[in-house]
Image (cartoon, rainbow, N blue to C red):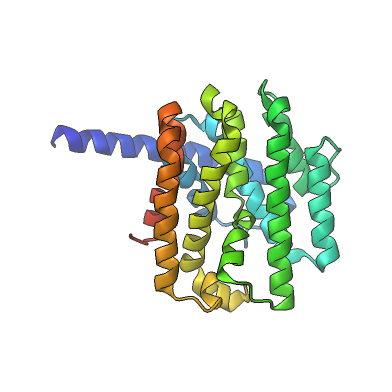
Amino acid sequence: MPDDELTEAFELGSTCALAAECGRDLRQCAQMYGELFPPGAFDAELYTTLSLTGAFSAPWATAQRLRVANRAALWVLAVGRMVDRTSTGRRTVVALAEECLAVADGATPHAAVTRFLADLRDELATVREFEALRPLWRDQLARMMEAMTRAWSWRDTRAVPSFARYLDNADSRGTCFVDVSHWIYAGDFWARRHLAELREASAHVQRYLHLLADIATYRRAVSWGDLNVLMLGVSRAEVGETMARLAREAGDLLAPIGEGSPRTAAYLRRQIGFNAGYHGISG
């Protein structure tokens, strides 16, 4: 076997081993907040996907360093399910958002979903810089909850937003919240000092991932009655062109970031590449 093939195979094997370790932590985490993760909605494939995404986005990290990112991603899915599937009306969606923000501010949790968030908050608080960065973390959480509430309202009222407005609501995807949590917990000194700047690049990647996920889950969205970008009167070609533009713009934003923190830039680039490959979408 040529040396380059041996090296590539070793790196892939190491990354898969990292994903397996992350997966064990996620499954144990889900058991801690039982009712949030019913097996019918959170199956083995979901935990595998989350673990692989984290590991291939930062293969140089340890499972411990990826723990907050992976758990935050799992928490986002739990909140999204509550908003989309178990809420009984706008009042319950707004109340959930308010409770989450209160816990982010330090309130005592009274439900599994906010207890999970409080545990994330307290884990982040073990980082010395968290107190100074907490307003940015809280703001990103608020943006996510506001976007989820808006998406719920569109679906509830059968509203059809414009393509641009739909794309601007990509915070409902929650990946920026995951990224901010990750950089506070496991980012290097440069990343923590430039978190506001990183959020702009993260938002570009989030918009790309928002459209990518919609393309990958279109049939499911139709059967479940969810809103999807392909229901807004735009073609797959137009969506593909927008994704290509977002990827180019993200690359432009990541170039100077790479000079200050190569791994931070690589983490975001690899999110685009891994997710596109995982869903089998080229270009």
Q: Is residue 173 visible?
A: yes
Question: Residue 167 vs residue 107: left or right?
Answer: left
- Return the x and y of residue 213 as percentages of the image width and height: 50, 61
The residue drawn where x is 40% and y is 66% is: 240
In front here: 240 or 245? Answer: 245
Question: Residue 37 vs residue 112: left or right?
Answer: left
Q: Quadrant of residue 104?
A: top right
Q: Residue furthest top?
A: 128
In front here: 82 or 21? Answer: 82
Q: Quadrant of the C terminus?
A: bottom left
Q: Quadrant of residue 108?
A: top right
- Return the x and y of residue 273 as percentages of the image width and height: 38, 49
- Return the x and y of residue 262 as percentages of the image width and height: 41, 30
Count of picture labels: 0
**Relative vertical location of residue 42 with respect to residue 270 in this rendering, above or below:** below
**Relative vertical location of residue 45 with respect to residue 176 in this rendering, above or below:** below
Q: Quadrant of the N terminus?
A: top left
The residue drawn where x is 69% and y is 73% is: 155
In front here: 30 or 151? Answer: 151
The residue drawn where x is 54% and y is 22% is: 189
The residue drawn where x is 60% and y is 43% is: 178
Q: Is residue 58 visible?
A: no
- Return the x and y of residue 242 as percentages of the image width and height: 44, 63
Question: Residue 69 vs residue 113: left or right?
Answer: left
